[in-house]
Image: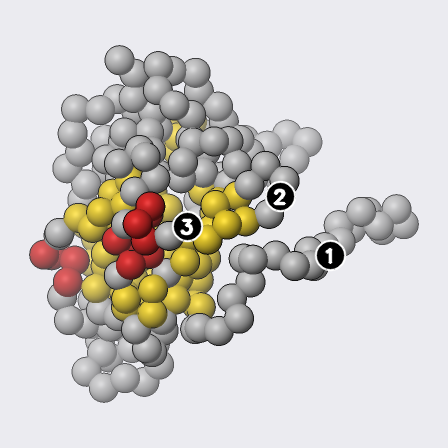
Amino acid sequence: MDPWTGNHRFQLVPNQPARLPSGQSMDAGWADYNGDGRVDLLVANGYDRGEANVLYRSNPDGTFTAVSASEAGALVSDRATTLLCTWVDYDMDGIPDVATLAGSQVRLYHNDGSGRFSRVPIPDFSANNGRWGLAWVDYDNNGFLDLMVACGDAMGFPGFLGQKSHLYRNNGNGNHWLKVRLTGTTSNRDGIGAKVRVKATISEYLIPAEATSSAAFYRATAE
Protein backbone atom coordinates (compact mmCIF):
# COMPACT_ATOMS: atom_id res chain seq x y z
CA MET A 1 0.00 0.00 0.00
CA ASP A 2 1.23 3.49 -0.85
CA PRO A 3 1.99 5.13 2.56
CA TRP A 4 1.30 8.61 1.17
CA THR A 5 -2.02 8.13 -0.59
CA GLY A 6 -3.34 4.98 1.06
CA ASN A 7 -3.88 3.43 -2.37
CA HIS A 8 -3.17 -0.25 -2.89
CA ARG A 9 -0.68 -1.23 -5.55
CA PHE A 10 -0.45 -4.50 -7.45
CA GLN A 11 2.69 -6.14 -8.75
CA LEU A 12 2.75 -8.82 -11.44
CA VAL A 13 3.80 -12.17 -9.98
CA PRO A 14 6.49 -13.66 -12.26
CA ASN A 15 6.72 -17.21 -13.56
CA GLN A 16 3.12 -18.16 -12.85
CA PRO A 17 1.69 -21.11 -14.82
CA ALA A 18 -1.73 -19.41 -14.72
CA ARG A 19 -0.62 -17.33 -17.70
CA LEU A 20 -1.94 -18.56 -21.01
CA PRO A 21 0.70 -18.35 -23.76
CA SER A 22 -1.99 -18.72 -26.42
CA GLY A 23 -5.75 -18.94 -26.70
CA GLN A 24 -8.68 -16.58 -26.64
CA SER A 25 -9.69 -16.01 -23.04
CA MET A 26 -12.77 -13.86 -22.42
CA ASP A 27 -13.51 -14.41 -18.73
CA ALA A 28 -12.23 -15.94 -15.49
CA GLY A 29 -13.61 -16.72 -12.05
CA TRP A 30 -12.31 -17.65 -8.60
CA ALA A 31 -13.67 -20.28 -6.19
CA ASP A 32 -12.44 -23.04 -3.89
CA TYR A 33 -13.69 -25.92 -6.02
CA ASN A 34 -11.97 -28.70 -4.03
CA GLY A 35 -12.57 -27.50 -0.47
CA ASP A 36 -8.92 -27.06 0.55
CA GLY A 37 -9.43 -23.47 1.73
CA ARG A 38 -7.59 -21.86 -1.21
CA VAL A 39 -9.36 -20.15 -4.10
CA ASP A 40 -8.72 -21.66 -7.54
CA LEU A 41 -8.99 -20.09 -10.98
CA LEU A 42 -11.18 -21.03 -13.95
CA VAL A 43 -10.33 -19.42 -17.31
CA ALA A 44 -13.00 -19.43 -20.04
CA ASN A 45 -11.49 -19.98 -23.48
CA GLY A 46 -12.57 -20.07 -27.09
CA TYR A 47 -14.43 -16.90 -28.08
CA ASP A 48 -14.61 -17.43 -31.87
CA ARG A 49 -12.82 -20.79 -32.07
CA GLY A 50 -13.41 -23.97 -30.15
CA GLU A 51 -11.04 -24.30 -27.20
CA ALA A 52 -11.15 -25.99 -23.82
CA ASN A 53 -11.42 -24.09 -20.56
CA VAL A 54 -8.51 -24.23 -18.12
CA LEU A 55 -8.88 -24.85 -14.38
CA TYR A 56 -5.92 -23.89 -12.18
CA ARG A 57 -5.63 -25.38 -8.70
CA SER A 58 -4.04 -23.14 -6.10
CA ASN A 59 -1.07 -24.71 -4.32
CA PRO A 60 0.05 -24.05 -0.72
CA ASP A 61 3.17 -22.20 -1.96
CA GLY A 62 1.13 -19.66 -3.95
CA THR A 63 1.65 -21.26 -7.36
CA PHE A 64 -1.00 -22.79 -9.61
CA THR A 65 -1.29 -26.15 -11.35
CA ALA A 66 -3.42 -26.74 -14.45
CA VAL A 67 -5.90 -29.53 -13.67
CA SER A 68 -6.06 -32.32 -16.25
CA ALA A 69 -9.22 -33.48 -18.02
CA SER A 70 -8.86 -36.89 -16.39
CA GLU A 71 -9.21 -35.20 -13.01
CA ALA A 72 -11.63 -32.32 -13.70
CA GLY A 73 -13.78 -33.98 -16.37
CA ALA A 74 -16.00 -32.22 -18.89
CA LEU A 75 -15.35 -28.72 -17.56
CA VAL A 76 -11.87 -28.74 -19.09
CA SER A 77 -12.36 -31.31 -21.86
CA ASP A 78 -15.36 -29.75 -23.64
CA ARG A 79 -14.32 -27.49 -26.50
CA ALA A 80 -16.51 -24.47 -27.23
CA THR A 81 -16.56 -20.77 -27.97
CA THR A 82 -16.89 -19.83 -24.30
CA LEU A 83 -17.55 -16.17 -23.50
CA LEU A 84 -18.36 -16.24 -19.78
CA CYS A 85 -18.02 -18.46 -16.73
CA THR A 86 -19.64 -18.24 -13.29
CA TRP A 87 -19.23 -20.29 -10.14
CA VAL A 88 -22.54 -21.17 -8.52
CA ASP A 89 -23.87 -23.80 -6.11
CA TYR A 90 -27.08 -24.31 -8.06
CA ASP A 91 -28.14 -27.50 -6.24
CA MET A 92 -27.32 -26.28 -2.72
CA ASP A 93 -25.07 -29.20 -1.80
CA GLY A 94 -22.40 -26.84 -0.47
CA ILE A 95 -20.03 -27.49 -3.38
CA PRO A 96 -19.28 -24.90 -6.13
CA ASP A 97 -20.55 -25.80 -9.60
CA VAL A 98 -19.94 -23.91 -12.86
CA ALA A 99 -22.14 -22.31 -15.52
CA THR A 100 -20.63 -21.12 -18.81
CA LEU A 101 -21.93 -19.20 -21.79
CA ALA A 102 -20.67 -21.13 -24.81
CA GLY A 103 -21.84 -19.55 -28.05
CA SER A 104 -25.64 -19.53 -27.82
CA GLN A 105 -25.68 -22.23 -25.12
CA VAL A 106 -25.68 -21.99 -21.36
CA ARG A 107 -23.75 -25.00 -20.06
CA LEU A 108 -24.06 -26.20 -16.49
CA TYR A 109 -21.37 -28.38 -14.88
CA HIS A 110 -21.94 -30.26 -11.63
CA ASN A 111 -19.09 -30.71 -9.15
CA ASP A 112 -19.34 -34.15 -7.54
CA GLY A 113 -17.26 -33.10 -4.53
CA SER A 114 -14.05 -34.79 -5.66
CA GLY A 115 -13.22 -31.94 -8.06
CA ARG A 116 -14.66 -33.71 -11.10
CA PHE A 117 -17.27 -31.90 -13.19
CA SER A 118 -19.95 -33.46 -15.39
CA ARG A 119 -22.22 -31.55 -17.75
CA VAL A 120 -25.87 -31.34 -16.72
CA PRO A 121 -28.21 -31.64 -19.73
CA ILE A 122 -30.78 -28.83 -19.65
CA PRO A 123 -32.50 -28.48 -23.05
CA ASP A 124 -34.09 -25.10 -22.29
CA PHE A 125 -30.62 -23.56 -21.98
CA SER A 126 -29.72 -24.34 -25.60
CA ALA A 127 -31.95 -21.96 -27.58
CA ASN A 128 -30.27 -20.49 -30.64
CA ASN A 129 -30.13 -16.79 -29.93
CA GLY A 130 -27.68 -14.06 -29.02
CA ARG A 131 -26.69 -14.49 -25.39
CA TRP A 132 -24.23 -12.12 -23.77
CA GLY A 133 -24.50 -12.29 -20.01
CA LEU A 134 -25.27 -14.53 -17.01
CA ALA A 135 -26.34 -13.54 -13.50
CA TRP A 136 -27.47 -15.67 -10.56
CA VAL A 137 -29.88 -14.35 -7.92
CA ASP A 138 -32.64 -15.80 -5.76
CA TYR A 139 -35.42 -13.63 -7.18
CA ASP A 140 -38.29 -15.59 -5.59
CA ASN A 141 -36.62 -15.94 -2.18
CA ASN A 142 -36.88 -19.74 -1.98
CA GLY A 143 -33.21 -20.18 -1.06
CA PHE A 144 -32.09 -21.42 -4.49
CA LEU A 145 -30.29 -19.24 -7.02
CA ASP A 146 -32.12 -18.56 -10.29
CA LEU A 147 -30.50 -17.69 -13.62
CA MET A 148 -30.90 -14.52 -15.68
CA VAL A 149 -29.59 -14.73 -19.26
CA ALA A 150 -29.12 -11.46 -21.14
CA CYS A 151 -29.95 -11.76 -24.85
CA GLY A 152 -29.99 -9.39 -27.80
CA ASP A 153 -27.77 -7.61 -30.30
CA ALA A 154 -24.44 -6.74 -28.67
CA MET A 155 -22.08 -6.80 -31.67
CA GLY A 156 -24.22 -6.22 -34.71
CA PHE A 157 -24.93 -9.86 -35.49
CA PRO A 158 -27.94 -10.31 -37.80
CA GLY A 159 -31.06 -11.83 -36.29
CA PHE A 160 -30.23 -10.96 -32.67
CA LEU A 161 -31.80 -7.48 -32.55
CA GLY A 162 -34.86 -7.25 -30.32
CA GLN A 163 -34.49 -10.64 -28.68
CA LYS A 164 -35.80 -10.98 -25.16
CA SER A 165 -33.71 -11.99 -22.18
CA HIS A 166 -34.62 -15.11 -20.23
CA LEU A 167 -35.18 -15.78 -16.53
CA TYR A 168 -34.92 -19.41 -15.39
CA ARG A 169 -36.41 -20.39 -12.03
CA ASN A 170 -34.47 -22.91 -9.97
CA ASN A 171 -37.08 -25.35 -8.65
CA GLY A 172 -34.69 -26.51 -5.92
CA ASN A 173 -34.52 -29.75 -3.97
CA GLY A 174 -34.55 -30.90 -0.37
CA ASN A 175 -31.21 -29.36 0.65
CA HIS A 176 -31.09 -26.74 3.38
CA TRP A 177 -29.83 -23.20 2.97
CA LEU A 178 -28.65 -20.14 4.84
CA LYS A 179 -28.94 -16.58 3.58
CA VAL A 180 -26.70 -13.85 4.98
CA ARG A 181 -27.09 -10.16 4.17
CA LEU A 182 -23.80 -8.34 4.67
CA THR A 183 -23.56 -4.69 5.70
CA GLY A 184 -20.10 -3.17 5.94
CA THR A 185 -19.28 -0.74 8.75
CA THR A 186 -15.60 0.14 8.52
CA SER A 187 -15.33 -1.53 5.10
CA ASN A 188 -17.43 -1.09 1.96
CA ARG A 189 -21.17 -0.91 2.65
CA ASP A 190 -22.10 -4.00 0.64
CA GLY A 191 -19.53 -6.27 2.30
CA ILE A 192 -17.90 -7.14 -1.02
CA GLY A 193 -14.86 -9.33 -0.41
CA ALA A 194 -16.14 -10.61 2.92
CA LYS A 195 -15.77 -14.27 3.88
CA VAL A 196 -18.50 -16.08 5.77
CA ARG A 197 -17.60 -19.46 7.23
CA VAL A 198 -20.25 -21.88 8.45
CA LYS A 199 -19.42 -24.90 10.56
CA ALA A 200 -21.37 -27.96 9.45
CA THR A 201 -20.94 -31.71 9.04
CA ILE A 202 -19.70 -31.28 5.46
CA SER A 203 -16.44 -30.10 3.97
CA GLU A 204 -15.95 -26.35 3.81
CA TYR A 205 -15.95 -24.63 0.44
CA LEU A 206 -15.39 -20.96 -0.26
CA ILE A 207 -17.02 -18.79 -2.93
CA PRO A 208 -15.96 -15.14 -2.49
CA ALA A 209 -18.72 -12.52 -2.42
CA GLU A 210 -18.83 -10.71 -5.76
CA ALA A 211 -19.85 -7.22 -6.81
CA THR A 212 -22.98 -8.42 -8.64
CA SER A 213 -25.26 -7.89 -5.66
CA SER A 214 -25.42 -6.18 -2.30
CA ALA A 215 -26.43 -9.50 -0.77
CA ALA A 216 -24.07 -12.45 -0.57
CA PHE A 217 -25.53 -15.94 -0.38
CA TYR A 218 -23.68 -18.83 1.25
CA ARG A 219 -25.11 -22.30 1.22
CA ALA A 220 -24.44 -25.49 3.13
CA THR A 221 -26.15 -28.77 3.81
CA ALA A 222 -26.22 -30.40 7.23
CA GLU A 223 -26.77 -34.04 8.09
Q: Amino acid at mark 2?
A: Gly
Q: Amino acid at mark 3?
A: Val
* Tag in front: 2 or 1: 2
- Residue 99 vertical placement versus 62 (above, below): below
Which residue appears at 59% of the width and 32% of the height? 184
Residue named by callout 2:
62
Secondary element type, mark 1: loop
Query: How many numbered discs?
Result: 3
Q: Residues within 10 Å of mark 2 (few under 14, many from 20)?
A: few
Which residue appears at 26% of the width and 61% of the height? 78
Q: Is residue 121 left or right of residue 43?
A: left
Marks 2/3: CA–CA distance = 16 Å
- Whether residue 210 is visible to the viewer of this picture, yes or no, is no
Residue named by callout 1:
11
- Residue 163 vertical placement versus 75 (above, below): below
| Depth check, front residue: 165 or 15 | 15
Q: Is residue 8 left or right of residue 41?
A: right
Of the residues under marks 1 and 3, which one precedes in the sequence? 1
In which quadrant of the rendered view does residue 159 lie? bottom left
In which quadrant of the rendered view does residue 10 lie? bottom right
Of the residues under marks 2 and 1, which one precedes in the sequence? 1
Where the C terminus falls, by quadrant? Answer: top left
- Residue 26 vertical placement versus 123 (above, below): below
